[in-house]
Every structure is written in C-alpha cells, then in structure tokens.
Amino acid sequence: MGGRLAWPALVVGVLLSVAGLAVVVVLGPDSRFTTGPHEVDTDAAAVVTAPGVVSYRGLQVDVLVEVPVNKPVFVGLGNTVDVQDYVSRTQRLEVTSFRVPWTVRTREVEGGPALPGAPTALDWWIAESAGLGGASISASLPDESVSVAVLAVGASDLSGLTVTFAYGVRGGFGLGLGAVLVGAGLVWVGLLLRRDTALVPARVAAPGASGEVEEVEEVVYVFVDERGVEHEISEEEAERLQARLDLAEQAEAPDPAPSEAAGPGSAVERPVEPASGEQTPPARATPPADPPAPAPVQDVVYVFVDEDGVEHEVSADELDDYEVVDEEDER
C-alpha cells in the first residue's frame, strides 16, 4: 500500500513545489509583479481597452503612464459601457487582447481628433489620476466589466507614451510559500514510503515443477529451556547444539545384547537337532527388516540465570565459562 502511494505523493509534491516557487519568484515579498515601461506607438488622443480585455476579478492592478515632460495626461478605470460611450467619436488606439506579463494586440479606430469633454470633469470613474508628464492609478478590479483609458488632456496627443503595469494577488506570496512547503512535505512523505517499501524483505520465489511460483519461507531455530522459555538461536548454534546432543545420546546408549550383535532387524535361526541317521540342515538367515525411522531431535538452547533470576541466552561456545546444571540435579 505504501509503495503505491509513494509515486503519487512525489509527483504531486514536485508539481506543487514548482508552482509555489514560481508564484513566489514572480510576485515577490510584496505579492506584486511589475512589467514595463512599455512604449505605445500612437499619436491619437485616447488609448482604451476593449470590452472583456480586463477580466481578472479581484486582481490588484497598478497602471503608470508617462509622456514627455510638461505634457498633460489622464488615466482612469471605469465601467466599460461608460468608457466606450465617452470615446465613441474620438480617434483612438484600442487594445483588443492582453496577456500577462505584456502581450498586447491593438487596432486603430477612426474618429475625431479631440475628446468630447475634459475627462477630469466626469464622476463615474472608479479610479482616476491626471498630471503633467505622468499619472498613475491603483485599484482592485470589481466584478463588473471595466476598461482602462489613457487620455490626452486639452489639445495635446499621446505621442511618446509609455506604460508600466503591475498586478498582484492579495496574500499571493504567502500562498506560494505555503504551496512550496506543502509540496516539500509530500516529497518527503513519498521518499519515506519508498524507503520503507525497499526495507521490507521480499519473499524469494522460485518456479516449481509445474511452472507455478513457490514461496520460500525463512526458517527460525528456537530452543526451549527447562523453564519453558523459548530462545531464538542461529543456524550455526543449532547445528553445534544438535551435534552435542547426538554425542550425549550415543554415550548414554546401552551395549547391544549378544543376540543383537548380528545387527538391528536381523535374526539367525538355531539349527534343529536332527534325528539319528539324518543330516543336519544348514541354518537359514532371516532377511533384515527395514530400519526404523530416526526420531526427530529437538533443538537445544542454553540459558544462563544470574543472581537476580534474569535469564540470558548463551551460545554453545560460551558453555565452558558457565556451570551446567541439569534439571534432575536441581530436584
């Protein structure tokens, strides 16, 4: 289960970290991105955005317009219907497409050389500013359709115009940093899941005679002492203890009876006394029976009990350092 979740966590974590890092780099600590100044080539009296071009609801925007010194200029943000109605009879440059950071498409619209009235006298602007040589506005885009208008004041035009545009998302830097941290956390979790999966011992599979995969399980050797406590030992210790046990059993085994000297499972029939005048028949040997199956021998584990009654498992090589006590001797 952990191995299946490792890769999705890694992929999502990397993507989230990259996206968050891009937001942090682009917006910066002030959560704003600035592009410009960009030159706008026009000698008309107005530059406006077409309906639907400014559609980022809730986005905080700053617009700075600059013209040659001592030349008056106006910049304003208003409802699209009001702006289009105001400049409908004026020659203008209309921005038909805009993509951040600064990719614009424009078209020239024919009309009169001057505006129908001073833009500073209108009261429906959402944000407005006017000045000599430059002007700027800062506003949060509302839910309604709006347009940005850069207008010449008086008899001047907008030749030599440059525009600097800045936009940002409130708390954007914090959101981007949070995305980086969450993504890094997912990457860390994914790496942990992969490591845990790699540490799990896989069962060795070998093809059987029928082509099916057989599972080979691990063998554990356990010795049970006289107190009934189980102790796990290694394969080498089990072999040594088994050899010691075999030697002990051979030493305690009684000598075979004379009748068994011929070997286990075999017997020789005694000759029958023949009658007088008859020849003695030869002795017949009974074929040996199948030898009995060897009895299973239990593994042996040696335990040392200290003065506090705590048991400690010892190996066969360490037996010479301790006194061996048999259970029958304790009784």
Image (cartoon, rainbow, N blue to C red):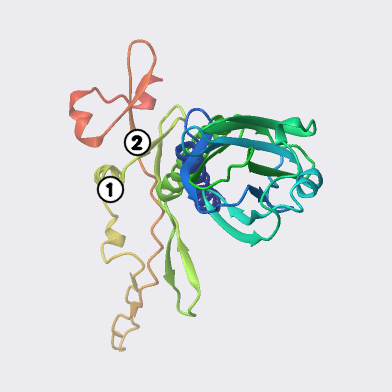
Task: Please say if 325 is above or below 264.
Answer: above
Residue at position x 32%, y 15% in the image: 306
Residue nearer the viewer, 146 or 273: 146
Percent x, y for residue 282?
28, 84
* Count of marks placed on residues: 2
Residue 124 occupies quadrant: top right
The amino acid at mark 2 is Val
Q: Name the residue under label 1.
A: 239
Residue at position x 45%, y 38% in the image: 25
Residue nearer the viewer, 189 or 297: 189
Answer left or right for 86 relative to 168: right
- For numbered disc 2, what is the local secondary structure? loop
Q: Name the residue under label 2.
A: 301
The reply to whether residue 14 is in sight is: no
The reply to whether residue 37 is in sight is: yes
Mark 1 to mark 2: distance in Å?
11 Å
The amino acid at mark 1 is Glu
| Residue 252, label in figure | none
Percent x, y for residue 277?
30, 89
- For numbered disc 1, what is the local secondary structure? helix
**N-term mark: 1 or 2:** 1
Percent x, y for residue 12?
54, 49
Percent x, y for residue 177?
51, 33
Label 2 neighbourhood size at 10 Å, few (<14), some (14-19), many (20+)? many
Residue 104 occupies quadrant: bottom right
Answer left or right for 64 relative to 88: left
